[in-house]
Image (cartoon, grey):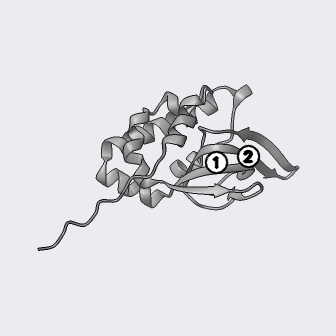
């Protein structure tokens, strides 16, 4: 008689869920994605503790990883012909990488750690796995990311970069 194999244990994303709930920006992920979805999403993200100046996203790289920021801050910069342009500092409860996720094009800005932070990464392969195993959660996340992207792009005076 063989014993059943253990099921994967979901990670504790309660800190991330709380950060998303506290984020009151118009483009906050919490406005578009219900917190209960994270009971499923927890199995598809990987945490990382990052120190100041760590390069999370490099402008020009072709990568489709999403990053959810639980704590700390990241800064977004874009290299142009005129030099380096500082675009934003983003805090807890933020998602970055949605542009590359949707477009599958080179990143149009760099994102680096501004203050020590904890991020949760979801590579595109993990999203594909989520879509196969939990299509309704994948759809909810996709719609939420699209809403965040659209909200960030609507008001030019508050426009944030899409990485």
Q: Quadrant of residue 106?
A: bottom right
Work out whether mark 1 precedes mark 2 in sequence or the reverse, and give the earlier one: 2
Residue 129, visible in the rendered structure: yes
| Residue 118, above or below 92 | below
Give the left or right position of residue 116, taking residue 138 as reference: right
Q: Real-space Cα distance between discs 1 and 2?
A: 8 Å
Check whether the beta carbons of the residues at disc 1 and disc 2 lie within 8 A of each other: yes
Q: Which residue is labeled 1 in the image?
A: 163
The residue to which callout 2 is attached is 76
Q: Residue lying farthest bottom?
A: 1
Q: Residue at x 47, y 54 (%)?
A: 45
- Determine the residue located farthest toward the left in the rendered image: 1
- What residue is drawn where x is 37% and y is 41%? 139
Q: Nearer the viewer, residue 62 or 71?
A: 71
Name the image quarter holding the N terminus.
Answer: bottom left
Residue ID at (81%, 44%): 86
Indicate which label's residue lies in the foreground, 1 or 2: 2
Mark 2 Cα shell of 10 Å, populated few (<14), some (14-19), many (≥20): many
Viewer-nearest residue: 2 or 24? 2
33 w.r.t. 115: above or below:
above
Of residue 51 and residue 135, the one placed in the foreground of this image is 51
Secondary structure beneath label 2: strand
Q: Position of residue 155 (x, y in %)?
A: 67, 25
Residue 152 screen position, x and y as percent:
62, 33
């Amino acid at each position: 008689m063989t014993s059943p194999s253990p099921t994967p244990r979901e990670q504790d994303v309660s800190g991330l869920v709380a950060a998303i709930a506290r984020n009151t920006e118009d483009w906050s992920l919490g406005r578009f994605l219900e917190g209960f979805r994270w009971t499923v999403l927890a199995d598809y993200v990987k945490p990382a503790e990052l120190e100041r100046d760590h390069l999370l996203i490099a402008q020009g790289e072709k990568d489709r990883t999403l990053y959810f920021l639980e704590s700390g801050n990241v800064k977004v910069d874009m290299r142009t012909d005129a030099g380096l342009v500082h675009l934003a500092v983003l805090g807890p409860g933020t998602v970055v990488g949605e542009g590359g996720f949707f477009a599958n094009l080179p990143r149009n800005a760099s994102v680096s750690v501004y203050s020590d932070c904890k991020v949760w990464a979801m590579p595109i392969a993990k999203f594909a796995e989520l879509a196969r195993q939990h299509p309704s959660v994948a759809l909810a996340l996709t719609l939420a990311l699209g809403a965040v992207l659209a909200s960030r792009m609507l008001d030019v005076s508050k426009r944030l970069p899409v990485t």
